[in-house]
Amino acid sequence: MSNTQNIQWFPGHMAKTKRQISETIRIIDAVVEIVDARIPISSRNPDLMGIIGNKPHIILLNKSDMADPAVTNKWIKYFNDMGNLAIAVDCKTGKGINDFKNTVKSVLSEKLKTNREKGLIGKPLRVMAVGIPNVGKSSFINKLVGNTRAKVENRPGVTRGNQWFSVDKELELLDTPGVLWPKFDDETVGEHLAFTGAVTDRILDTELLGMRLLEILIENYKQMIEERFNITDFSIEPYENLCLLAKKRGMMIRGGEPDTERAANMLLEEFRNCKLGRITLEVPNA
Ligand code: G4P
């Protein structure tokens, strides 16, 4: 999927997805929710918890290669304290994928034991993968299932079109039926999704977005930004700082004015490609 896709909110689609997940959840043993480790709250679907009820729920903090490792550890603790297991993964390299497999099997060891006792030897555990667009769900499935992507036949009585994959003898994975959406009506959520490139820039003011990102980075990752752009005299005025960035990179328009739009684009691009360093924009409440 493209890095800057046009996510649009369709209430009808969301209702359909919820219905499909609710229908399927009864035959699932656990849910794996993929989130973006840089924005673990904004990259969640707010209704999911209500739909999956008390099924075992594992949270994958994906793209952890781009996130601040110290903050990722805080998130793992935070989710653990909330009763969910959380694992940091990187689906570009596959780091953490084995941890995931082991975790699922240990969380569901009772279930495997009961299956065996009931004579259901060889009945695999069924896990459903969910996540809003762009968190890396397809990359996760690819890494977990491998290139063969052995598909399992659709289960009778369950929504048609569900995609099942065989991971190994003990584990089957179901891709989310439908598309889950983030909490678009929250301004901070929209902004954080835009910073990471999960929503297209075309519907947003790039200059404002860049200015806002710079403000957040100066507040939380000042040293990183100072070193990257060789600037130590940041102002308290966000627009001034964008001008400073433009000047430092020689981005000027005719008349000698700083090209703040280009500077904003450059900052967003460098953040999205992790050129500024490993940064997390959301920190759990202590
Ligand atoms: P989705 O199914 O949830 O929509 O996400 P998808 O797997 O398509 O991944 C969205 C983008 O995020 C892809 O980049 C993908 O390569 C990247 N990605 C996924 N997991 C990770 C990760 O753990 N670390 C990093 N650094 N990137 C990850 P893209 O630019 O859209 O495509 P491409 O770079 O693969 O060509």
Image: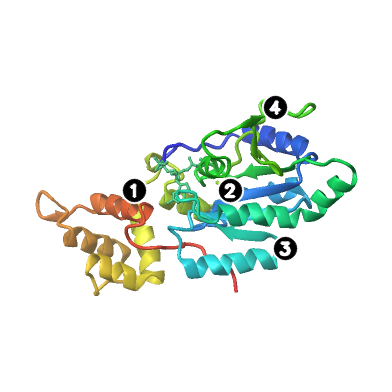
Rendering quarter of residue 14: top right
Asked whether the residues under the numbered discs 2 and 3 touch, taking CB atoms below 8 Å apart as contact, a structural biologist would say no
* Residue 63, horizontal then vertical, whole percent: 48, 54
Alpha carbon separation for disc pair 1 and 2: 21 Å
Q: Nearer the viewer, mark 2 or mark 3?
A: 3
Q: Earlier in the sequence, mark 3 or mark 1?
A: 3
Residue that appears at 34% across and 58% down: 211
Query: Around disc 4, counting alpha carbons within 10 Å, would you say few (fewer than 14), some (14 to 19), or many (20 or more)?
Result: few
SS class, disc 2: loop
Which residue is denoted by mark 1 in the rendering?
206
**Residue hosting label 4:** 153
Is disc 2 surrounded by few (<14), some (14 to 19) or many (20+) residues within 10 Å? Answer: some
Mark closer to the observer (4, 2) = 4
| Image coords of residue 12 (percent x, y) | 64, 31
Q: Mark 2 or mark 4, which is nearer the start of the sequence?
A: 4
Label 1 vs 4, first from the N-terminus: 4
Mark 4 vs 3, N-terminal side: 3
Mark 2 vs mark 3: which is more N-terminal?
A: 3
| Label 1 element class | helix
Q: Which residue is depicted at the point 47% across and 62% down?
A: 281
Q: Nearer the viewer, residue 14 or 81?
A: 81
Q: Name which residue type carries label 2.
A: Lys
Picture quadrant where residue 218 is located: bottom left
In terms of secondary structure, where does tag 3 sit?
loop
Residue beneath disc 2: 183
Q: Which residue is mark 3?
A: 83
Which disc is residue 110 wearing? Answer: none
